Image (cartoon, grey):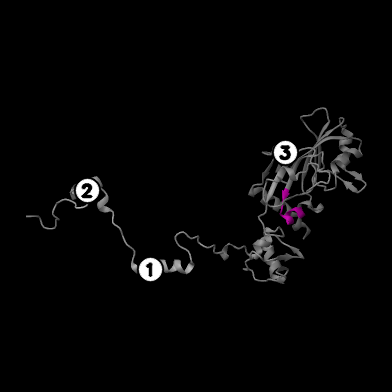
Amino acid sequence: MRESGKRPEGRNKRSGKSERESNQAKPFEVFRKKINPPKEKAERTVSSKKELGYGKGKKRPDVEDTNTLPRLNQYVAKAGVCSRRQADELIAAGKVKVNGKPVRTMGYRVQVDDKVEYEGKTLIGEELRYVLLNKPKGFLCTASDEKDRKTVMDLVKKACKERIYSVGRLDRDTTGLLLFTNDGELAKRLTNPASKVKKVYHVVLDKPMIEEDLVALSRGVELEDGMVKPDVVSYVQDAPDGTQIGVQIDSGKNQVVRRIFEHIGYNVIRLDRVLFANLTKKDVPRGKWRVLRDKEVSMLKVIAGKTSTKKA
């Protein structure tokens, strides 16, 4: 007589094994239970697939998520016009047009085929890029050259997919730091003569500079296009012969460093920019580039912002 609550032990008709042998072969099989979904839920899933027109063997259609589209203020800021907060003010004032009409809605999301304009210029809302190059000798600071000479754009063409431009220029024979960006507003401020962005040059002369000339240079030189007064002029300590000079200057005049030395009777053999604003040549070998860190970009904006604050 079998015990109450137990099934009789016997052979499994399909496998030919007893139930005990079968459980020993698969010790966890007794805990595996298939849970069938409710019929209503299964039917709802099938019907939803039929409505959307996709299923097994068919590709799910691309559905555009409006939340991924950029807001108008973000689009304007990425185009390099101004900061996002300032973009809100431009939008509220009706100065930003979408498809030819002013849009004052702050939450408006720019569609793929929208044409956004500010002051008559079509904006391209792309990611802002900041690239620092250690320029070698023999490269022109231009986008292209009719004589097919080497340009700095050849060196940074793989830095990013966005189109970037140099902030200011270095002549063909001058080496050193050169900043590239598509942030038009920042570039405009950094190259503004009133910005007084600090630049430091390492100058190698054709002959030793006497101390009297060094003092005269520090007091300022009158060039044909105006007075130029360096912030700091000093001998380079590692070159005791007096042929190497360090110059800190904020003037944005064309070839100003070469010209001030030539004005007092010295020819510049080598000229290297070793500092621009808050940027140095650390971790940037000659002919190479690197992307600026977030902290460096923030500091650049602070430097540019100080100018606008003083002017206001």
Q: Nearer the viewer, residue 174 or 259?
A: 174
Residue 249, position as x, y percentages in the image: 81, 44
**Is residue 181 inside the magenta stretch?**
yes
Q: Residue at x 87, y 46 (%)?
A: 228
**Residue 287, label in figure:** 3
Q: Which residues are magenta?
A: 180-189
Q: Taking the image as drawn, is residue 296 in sight?
A: yes
Q: Residue at x 48, y 66 (%)?
A: 53
The quadrant the C terminus occupies is bottom right
Label 3, label 2: how far apart the Cα atoms are: 73 Å
Q: Taking the image as drawn, is residue 305 in sight?
A: no
Task: Please tell me in which quadrant of the rendered image residue 230 appears.
Answer: top right
Residue 71, position as x, y percentages in the image: 63, 64
> Mark 2 is on which residue type?
Ser
Farthest residue in the left direction? Answer: 1
| Tag 2 and tag 1, C-beta contact below 8 Å | no
Label 3, label 1: how far apart the Cα atoms are: 65 Å
Residue 95, position as x, y percentages in the image: 73, 68
Q: Nearer the viewer, residue 306 or 200?
A: 200
Q: Is residue 277 left or right of residue 259?
A: left
Whichever of callouts 3 and 1 sits on the residue coming sooner in the sequence is 1
Give the residue number, with chain letter if any, for mark 2: 22
Q: Nearer the viewer, residue 296 or 306?
A: 296
**Residue 43, label in figure:** 1
Q: Is residue 30 left or right of residue 221?
A: left
> Mark 3 is on which residue type?
Gly
> Mark 1 is on which residue type?
Glu
**Secondary element at tag 1:** helix
Other-residue count near label 3 (Cα within 10 Å), few / some / many at <14 / 14–19 / ≥20: some
Task: Kindly report which numbered mark, 3 or 2, lies closer to the viewer in this rendering.
Answer: 2
The quadrant the N terminus occupies is bottom left
